[in-house]
């Protein structure tokens, strides 16, 4: 199972590429796609929209159909992550993940979901799902999320704190990251990927 993070400034192409990769996940696994579309962006307009948490759950596990949902609150988002942990066999794309995590905090269900994709053995089972996160601010990714990321895809970043963190944690050249043209990126493998 895959956990990938896509970071970059607005209109860099991160959500477009994340959606393309999520589509590949759907074709490879046969599992539906859940898009958490915090801001209702048009990039995901081809994915059927549902209005409620119950609608998302029904679409994914009763109908086996992909959907996008715009959570009305962090509590509703947490309930959906609980459902994803319980149901499994789904591909998840969380666009603008900063709405549900920051460098200082991450919801327990999201942390469990990310960590559970990595577990194997008798004590825990690896969840059968793929997770893709996008964010404009690399500095906002919580250490729990980064610990689970197997693939980091970096588009143009210009904020000094983002560049510092990318240089400090991944050894990325700040000038190279700052100079990336639109739709170009640097792919960094992490963990045991």
Image (spheres, rainbow, N blue to C red):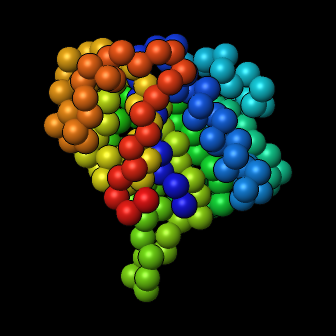
Q: 11 left or right of 178?
A: right
Q: Is residue 26 visible?
A: yes
Where 32 sits versus 21, above or below? below
| Residue at (50, 24) in percent of width and height | 184
- Between 68 and 57, the one lying in front of the other is 68
Give the percent coordinates (x, y) of residue 47: 75, 31
Percent x, y for residue 117? 47, 62
Task: Work out which quarter of the rendered image holds the C terminus and state it.
Answer: bottom left
Residue located 20% across and 17% down the image: 160
Q: Nearer the viewer, residue 128 or 178?
A: 178
Q: Percent from the top left, x then y, of residue 65?
A: 80, 46
Which residue of the protein is positioned furthest toward the right in this rendering?
63
Give the quadrant of residue 69.
Answer: top right
Residue 106 locus on image (x, y percent): 32, 42
At x 47% / y 51%, what residue is drawn? 3
Taking 193 as reference, is 80 above or below it? above
Look at the image and tell me in which quarter the N terminus lies: bottom right
Residue at the (72%, 49%) spot, across then down = 26
Q: Residue furthest bottom?
A: 122
């Amino acid at each position: 199972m895959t956990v990938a993070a896509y970071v970059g400034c607005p209109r860099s192409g991160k959500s477009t590429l994340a959606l393309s990769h999520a589509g590949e996940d759907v074709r490879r696994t046969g599992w539906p796609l859940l898009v958490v579309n915090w801001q209702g962006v048009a990039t995901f307009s081809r994915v059927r929209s549902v209005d409620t948490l119950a609608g998302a759950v029904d679409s994914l596990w009763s109908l086996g159909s992909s959907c996008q949902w715009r959570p009305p609150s962090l509590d509703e988002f947490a309930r959906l992550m609980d459902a994803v942990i319980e149901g499994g066999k789904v591909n998840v794309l969380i666009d603008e993940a900063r709405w549900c995590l920051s460098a200082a905090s991450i919801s327990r269900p999201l942390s469990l979901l990310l960590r559970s994709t990595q577990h194997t053995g008798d004590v825990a089972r690896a969840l059968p799902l793929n997770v893709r996160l996008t964010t404009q601010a690399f500095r906002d990714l919580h250490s729990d999320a980064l610990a689970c990321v197997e693939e980091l895809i970096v588009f143009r970043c210009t904020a000094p704190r983002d560049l510092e963190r990318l240089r400090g944690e991944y050894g990325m050249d700040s000038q190279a990251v700052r100079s990336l043209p639109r739709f170009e990126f640097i792919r960094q493998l992490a963990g045991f990927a």
